[in-house]
Image (cartoon, helix red, strand yellow):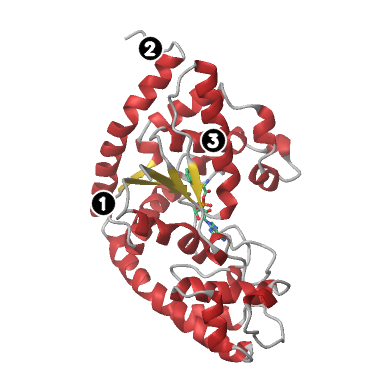
Amino acid sequence: VTRVVSGIQPTGNLHLGNLLGAILRWVKMQDEAPCLFFLADLHSLSDHIPAETRLAQVRSMAAALVASGIDPQKAILFAQSDVPAHAELCWLLNGTARMGWLHRMTQWKDKSGKNKEGASVALFDYPVLQAADILLYQASHVPVGEDQKQHIELTRDIAIKFNQDTGTDLFTVPQPFIGGGTAARVMSLRDGSAKMSKSDPSDMSRINLVDSDEEIAAKIRKARTDPEPLPGDPELLKERPEARNLVGIMAAVTNESEAAVLARFEGQGFGAFKPALADALVAMIAPIRARFNELERDVAALDRILDDGAARANALGQPTLLAAKRALGLSRH
Ligand code: TYM
């Protein structure tokens, strides 16, 4: 691992899927390698929201990341729009990326739905900006949840084609770095076949960083399950997606294997399991939420962190941007 880069859209609240799939893994990596983490506010332009909302969401997500353990002294934490090279490199890579590649992206297919003609160009071009985010810093590893894997594979294709087309080895070809077990893909509490997501209309489908202890307990109590008792063998959860998700969440939160979790609950029903899961979630989330509430109030401190991060990211990205422009005949100097 020579350099780690990852981002999060600042829209809405941080939820358990983001925490287990990405953020808490970023926190571990910041001690092991040079890391850049950013708020993807340019990506959020694919939906129209009022300017004040976007600005508030960027600061709020910065507070959430610091509260979760991102240390701005160790990792570079910044807002994407503060580093113009992201947008500039995106345009350069637009010459490399193929329409067919973007048409195959499942996120494009899902989010544009039936109204392809009415979708924003930004939604279609979204993965090319994501490639720019990563390639600008010559990232070797990109820690993300399973849902982003296809975008990282596209980033690899863009890097390889750019290098080939220009006869250089300018871009490092990055690896997706995805966690094991349920953490890679935390599912909705209401539907074991849908991922937990901030766009799900039902708030009961997800645990948010800002949920109170009571809300967390109520959401777990009402989470969809089946009437069978828990087995001792994780293999036997294969056909029980809701049960598997809850057991997987418990394992991720308490840092145990699923087998170890099941050993504690074998033969018991969800009446016994759910309160224990709610307690484990509250133990993890309550301290993060308390720090978040503190940090969110200090706008000046958040802006200092983001300004400092932007200055460092700008300096790191410049050489690659310049090299890419040279490789394309865009720099006379
Ligand atoms: P975003 O904002 O949707 O999600 C942020 C991170 O959380 C992960 N994640 C999940 N992991 C497990 N289970 C879930 N249910 C779940 N939901 C979300 C995501 O995989 C992601 O790692 N396009 C990205 C943001 C981005 C980016 C980048 C990421 C922009 N540029 C460059 C990496 C590198 C996105 O929308 O993530």
| Crowd rating for badge 3 (residues with CA inside 10 Å; few <14, some 14–19, many 20+) | many
Task: Give the residue type at disc 3.
Answer: Arg
Mark 1 element type: loop
Q: Is residue 28 left or right of residue 143?
A: left
Tell me the distance, in whole angstroms, between the alpha carbons under discs 2 and 1. Answer: 34 Å
Q: Can residue 267 be seen in this view?
A: yes
Which residue was labeled with disc 3? 156
- Identify the disc placed on residue 234: none
Q: In which quarter of the image is residue 254?
A: bottom left
Quarter in which the C terminus is drawn: top left
Q: Which residue is drawn at 56% across and 25% down?
A: 161
* Disc 2: which residue: 331
Q: Earlier in the sequence, mark 1 or mark 3?
A: 1
Mark 1 vs mark 3, CA separation in Å: 27 Å
- Residue occupying the point 32% across, 58% down: 66
Q: Dot 1 surroundings within 10 Å: few (below 14), some, or many (20 or more)?
A: some
Per the image, the residue denoted by label 1 is: 74
- The answer as to whether callout 3 falls within 8 Å of ligand 1 is no
